[in-house]
Amino acid sequence: MQKCSLCGGRVVNGRCEECGMPIPPEPTYTLRGESAHYHRVNGEDVLHRVRPTGSRPKVDGYDEEERTAHVHESGSDRHEAPRAVVRTARHAGIRTAKRTGTAAWSLITAALFLLLPALYLLLQRSTVTPVPEPEEQVTEADSNAYDDLRGTVPAAGADWDGSLTAGLYTVGQDLPEGTYTIQCAESNTSIDLHIVSDAYGVEIYEDLSTNGYDAIDSERDDVPLPAGTVLFLTGNGTLYFHSSNAQVDALPTETAPNPLVGDAAYTLSDSDESLYLLVGEDIEPGVYDVTCTAGTGYFSFVLPMENTRTMYCSAWLYGDPDYVDTLRHIALTEDTEVTLSNYSDMDFTVTLTPSETVYVHE
């Protein structure tokens, strides 16, 4: 019977029953003058070649006549039976090798199952770029932004203190150039501070509040504000500004009355979502105090900057008979688009009143 050359399994119809490996049929051949046939030995089919009696080798312990006397009618020689013992031993050896090979494959498979997860994690760590924590990114961004402004303000100057509520302010006009400590001036304060220095390409957002929050949320220290920086404050409450190197001598000393004389009020009904107003057509250019007298919504506009940039300003306004939100010193220039957006189920009314003071520039 043909055996598999890999595992020693039985070959049936050209394929190993144990491992499935295709096995070509064994070539059968006979020498010249020989005859061949199969017969059962120890339960197996054994190929038996019969040579002419004149050419058979002698076997120890038998002479030629004895060997001839023991030849079967089929032509087989029973004295060659020891071959079966040798074949059986070789078969046993193959089975032993098969068992050893199976155990080896089992060990290799188990090792792969243990190593594959570790290899996957190692590959994943080597290909994935670690992402910094959001808090680290915010801190670094703020720090770098202020670092870009350091050295832009003279070190020597005078003490200056002032308070600002929600509105639009310019450093060098509404407050002197300097390095400031900014903090909430009272309890129940929540103000967003938008800082834009167009000359140095810096834009920073700060959120200052009290109302039981951590003390760090209510103060910013060592904030350089060079001349020309624009501050847009929104929310409720007051921010206190203090500087020890304020350039007070550079502040303008002359003011003039606001040429605007009349108020302008705009109302969105509860069914209206937005109203767009163009400065120069719907609104006179000028400096206004913007007050919400009813409802809730957004007041937004775009402020042009000197270096072909713009500053987007948007404020949430609320108004009722007991409380109103007001934005101070809102400068609206020609061709600026103002947007009112209603976010309530009632009328949203915004009134624009000319600010009291307008600075005179040479």
Image (spheres, helix red, strand yellow):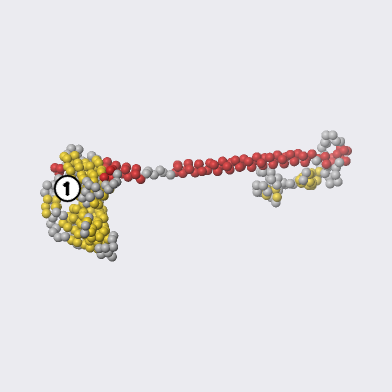
SS at mark 1 in the image: loop
What residue is at 49 percent from the left and 44 percent from the top?
120
Question: Residue 240 vs residue 256: left or right?
Answer: right
Q: Is residue 106 visible?
A: yes
Mark 1 Cα within 10 Å, few/some/many (few <14, many 20+)? many
Q: Quadrant of residue 52?
A: top right
Q: Position of residue 238 (x, y in %)?
A: 21, 48
Question: Residue 13 vs residue 298: left or right?
Answer: right
Q: Position of residue 46 (x, y in %)?
A: 77, 45
From the image, tell me which residue sits under label 1. Answer: 173
**Would you place residue 86 above or below residue 170 in this image?**
above
What residue is at 12 percent from the left and 49 percent from the top?
362
Q: Quadrant of residue 225?
A: top left
Q: Position of residue 68 (x, y in %)?
A: 87, 40
Q: Residue furthest top?
A: 61
Q: Position of residue 40 (x, y in %)?
A: 79, 46
What residue is at 69 percent from the left and 50 percent from the top?
14
Question: Residue 122 vs residue 21: left or right?
Answer: left
Question: Residue 101 vs residue 65: left or right?
Answer: left
How many numbered dots are placed on residues in this image?
1
- Camera-side residue of 76 and 188: 188
- Camera-side residue of 183 and 284: 183
Which three-letter amino acid code belongs to the residue tagged 1?
A: Gln
What residue is at 78 percent from the left and 44 percent from the top?
41
- Camera-side residue of 309 and 54: 309
**Would you place residue 156 above or below residue 346 in this image?**
above
- Camera-side residue of 235 and 147: 235
Q: Is residue 337 visible?
A: no
